[in-house]
Image (cartoon, rainbow, N blue to C red):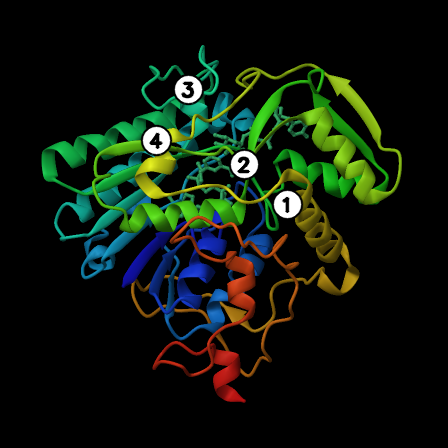
Amino acid sequence: MNALVTGCAGFIGSHLTEALLADGVDVIGIDCFNDNYGRREKLRNLERAMDWDGFEFVPIDLARGDLFELVEGRDTVFHLAAEPGVRASWGDRFEQYLRNNVLATQQLLEAASRSPLSRFVYASSSSIYGEAETSPTPEDLTPRPISPYGLTKLSAEQLCDLYHLSHGIPVVSLRLFSVYGPRQRPDMAFNRFCRAALDDATIDIYGDGDQTRDFTYVADVVTGLRLAARASGVEGRALNLGGGSRASVNEALSLIGELAERELRVSYGEAPNGDVRDTCAATTRTREALGFVPQTRLSEGLAAEFEWTQESLRPAHALSEAPGLQITGGARRGSTGRRRGAPPPARRDPPPPRANPGRAPGTEACSSAAARRPRTGARRGRSPRGARRR
Ligand code: NAD
Ligand code: UGA
């Protein structure tokens, strides 16, 4: 199998990329280092993938143009690149949302329509539902987004559906529910809460904190994305990817307080426009179609994210720029970042929350765990670059 992963330097995309590489999948990864957060964080997300021979990084903007050469010959496309984030989608930044969510998806689908693919997996969002009248929310509820972000994610999902119907692209849209874990985006709740807890700074809660989310651990999301790439009979469908741990923001805060072993400073303010009160995924269809059952409890996943935050705040980790990692722009293929003479990467991400004897059939190990145990020379082109040099 080979794959194209868009948004490979992002939070979820980097975990997915590593999980694929660790299983011997040849991956082309695309990212344009969009300015929704720091280039430095994204380079750091990419560090481990760069150590695999099976990885080629192509630093391009999907919205810019002809992507055919990148899609040609790929079995599977995982489309994760996007302008994410609910609250920033009002006002001036909407242009970015249109460009990176709608136009970029249309460009990729155009290219995909000219190349036979076995699957096109699109990372959609629970935000397409808006204030859902039914909870748990089933996939056939009429979507009614209440944020510009949700609207653009729905438009992209509908574009996927359109290209499935008109051009036969074997698309599956997965509606992800508030994903968390190591490398979570810096604008997201748990990342902000963990950092503030460690710094003894004030945590700003938007609203009364009793809003609930169906929080989904990133390794479970990676499992779901990969199951969607190979399940049969799911083309043209949209499925929820959630059901991990429904909790209120206040409940999550008290878990973080326990991890930090201190009383947290918390300030409550206005709930912003676009933030839904509650999310909760109906999970039956995804379980039946993909065999997907999330495995990670909130307390375990939060402990992993807290430990990662602690590690990334250590001075030694605050690199000026990931050393040895050079990204050459411009060329479309072959502009791969390479480690030159650098030792294998430091092991920074915490272990997965727990070994999982009850994992659903066909599901994979946590991406960060898998990436820490790369195969060494088991198959040609699959050894990590660091190991090969030893
Ligand atoms: P992220 O910002 O960490 O990753 C997205 C990546 O896409 C970034 O690295 C960015 O540089 C890249 N990108 C954006 N526009 C691009 C373009 N035009 N060309 C090339 N690269 C581009 O975000 P994430 O949280 O990892 O989200 C990944 C996907 O999952 C997104 O599609 C998002 O809408 C979806 N999603 C995320 C969550 C969540 O809780 N994180 C929930 C639901 C859906
Ligand atoms: C998340 C992602 O950011 C979106 O990209 C994604 O599409 C969406 O999930 C989804 O499920 O579709 P959100 O639920 O807002 O959106 O994620 P968090 O940033 O984790 O926020 C969770 C809750 O905490 C929200 O109610 C938010 O208002 C609140 N919050 C967030 C705070 O109270 N304070 C903060 O500093 C940040």
Element under disc 1 = helix
- Disc 4 crowd rating (10 Å Cα; few below 14, some 14-19, many 20+) is some
Name which quarter of the figure residue 3 lies in: bottom left
User: Pointer 2: what residue?
Assistant: 244
In the image, what residue occupies the spot 32% across and 45% down?
228
Q: Nearer the viewer, residue 299 or 13?
A: 299
Q: CA distance from mark 4 to mark 3?
A: 16 Å
Q: Are marks 1 and 2 in contact (CB under 8 Å)?
A: yes
Which circle's residue, 2 or 4, is located before the other in the chain? 2
In the image, what residue occupies the spot 22% across and 31% down?
161
Which circle's residue, 2 or 3, is located before the other in the chain? 3
Q: Amino acid at mark 2?
A: Gly
Q: CA distance from mark 2 to mark 3?
A: 18 Å
Q: What's the mark number on residue 129?
A: 3
Q: Nearer the viewer, residue 387 or 378?
A: 378
Q: Nearer the viewer, residue 375 or 341?
A: 375
User: Pointer 4: what residue?
Assistant: 285
From the image, state whether disc 1 or disc 3 is nearer to you: 1
- Across and down, in percent, residue 340 comes to 52, 80
- Across and down, in percent, residue 309 comes to 71, 50
Q: CA distance from mark 1 to mark 3?
A: 25 Å
Element under disc 3 = loop
- Across and down, in percent, residue 331 comes to 32, 64
Which circle's residue, 1 or 3, is located before the other in the chain? 3
Q: Amino acid at mark 4?
A: Arg
